[in-house]
Image: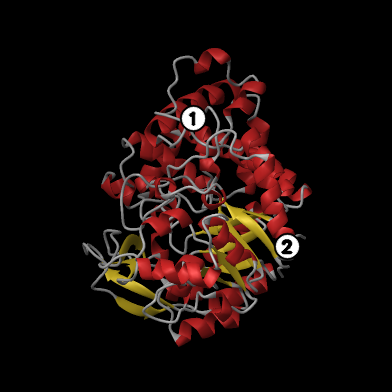
Amino acid sequence: MFKRSSGILMHITSLPNEQGIGTFGKESYEFIDFLKKSGQSYWQLLPIGPTGYGDSPYQSLSTFAGNILLIDLEVLKSKKLLTDADFKGRKFGVNDEVVDFTNVNKEKIELLRLAFERGKIAYKREMDTFTEEHAWLNDYTLFMALKYHNDLKSWQEWPKAFRTRDKKTLELARETHKDEMRFWTFVQYIFFKQWHELKVYANKNGIEMIGDIPIYVAEDSSDVWANPELFLLDKDNRPICVSGCPPDAFSATGQLWGNPIYNWDLMEENNYAWWIERIRASYELFDVVRIDHFRGFESYWSIPGGAKTAVKGEWIKGPEMKLFDAIKEELGELKVIAEDLGFLTEEVTNFKNASGYPGMKVLEFAFDTKEESDYLPHNYDTNCFVYTGTHDNDTVLGWFNNTDQDDIDKAIDYLKLTKEEGYHWGFIRGAWSSVGVVAVAQMQDFLGLDEKSRMNTPSTIGGNWEWRMKPGQLTDELAKKIMNMTKLYGRLC
């Protein structure tokens, strides 16, 4: 389903503008133009749902809703929903190099509320149609209204009648908070409208959008609150067990994600209806979807609820191909990337191969001198996406600054790296020249940025997801250089 080609990984939040965070505005259209000039076929993003704990796109308040911070306010100004006066005195961030989520959240939501007050009558018909087409809004808008009513606390800290979804209490809440629920419908309508316009532009210019969905959903999400039966929760709706990864190269104590584990037995009884709707919604947004932690469908690391680390967990069998056969039967063949990084057993490898989906190879993992690595390009087959690094990795230059010298020497020797070419360009060359069907590099690596521009450091809180590209860095010279490498290695479609 994939041709030999390449793409760039950069989240929309990292684009430069004057709104403190990248949006669906002109900077996104300019990036698509840059991708086209560079000969690229894909723009790969991180999840674009509303962020919760730690501002992580992998801890979303909803698996179906969109992150309204990505809405372009300039478009709302052109629609007369905002005015120049509304922006006076607004502080969207500390500088243009990082996303200041605290200020961006405050300012943008205040402005979106102004836009809603001016547009709620004019856009009534559009919002009504949008609501009819997206059934998940019924729970999500109430969830957000109650979340703001409860000072943004997790739903686990709400009064019991709300936490356990007492029917009469929720009926009254829908009447009490109906205008607030309408606001959350309005901003979702605007989000989806702006996104679809952007995607149409990308597709017309030969660019496919790669989305990313986490295997799990956040505990503090409308998904868990509205569907507690689909998760392994106790009688008080607290997680019995939570997700994570055992100790590995990223962390000596493992990764404690803390997401509730699915009730796979009940999901199987329902023929995986919730998952099918989740995947269907993803392909309304994207052309290709990367499924994070794909190995968790074969077996997953289950950690007791309340644990402080991920050390004391156990592997539990997942649904394997039963889930994906059900999805295929309902939705047909889909373009999927299986994120198969981490600890892989023979069973996981067989499961991934049975799915037929391409897996992932990461060059930064390839040069451990202690052992032969599956991530060395001479071990690849064609059915894989090859990355210099992902959002969880350091930049290439950061890797060189923070890696053992023996591993660095092995990379230099294997890839024939030179300082004249630039080590980051040598890594990109290694990915682009490989047999993997699609090669992808982070925008930071094309720009030759070091560890200060890293997107995320797993198992840490604070300082993540903040990196922003500076204005003027998408030059014609850079586009030409990327185009030449893409042509040289046969990845120009």
In the rendered image, is residue 366 in sight?
yes
At 67% from the left and 52% from the top, the residue drawn is 482
Which residue was labeled with disc 1?
A: 179
Distance from disc 1 to disc 2, alpha carbons, whole Å, reads 57 Å
**247 sits to left or right of 191:** left
| Amino acid at circle 1 | Asp
Q: Nearer the viewer, residue 389 or 274?
A: 389
In the rendered image, is residue 25 in sight?
no
**219 sits to left or right of 477:** left
Q: Nearer the viewer, residue 449 or 353?
A: 449
Percent of width and height locating residue 344: 43, 79
Percent of width and height locating residue 475: 65, 39
Instruction: Look at the image and tell me in which quarter the N terminus lies.
Output: bottom right
**Mark 2, residues whose alpha carbon is within 10 Å: few (<14), some, or many (≥20)?**
few
Query: Is 422 drawn above or below residue 314 in the view shown?
Result: above
| Amino acid at circle 2 | Leu
Query: Is 154 drawn above or below residue 346 in the view shown?
Result: above
Query: Is 254 drawn above or below residue 140 in the view shown?
Result: below
Which residue was labeled with disc 2?
A: 488
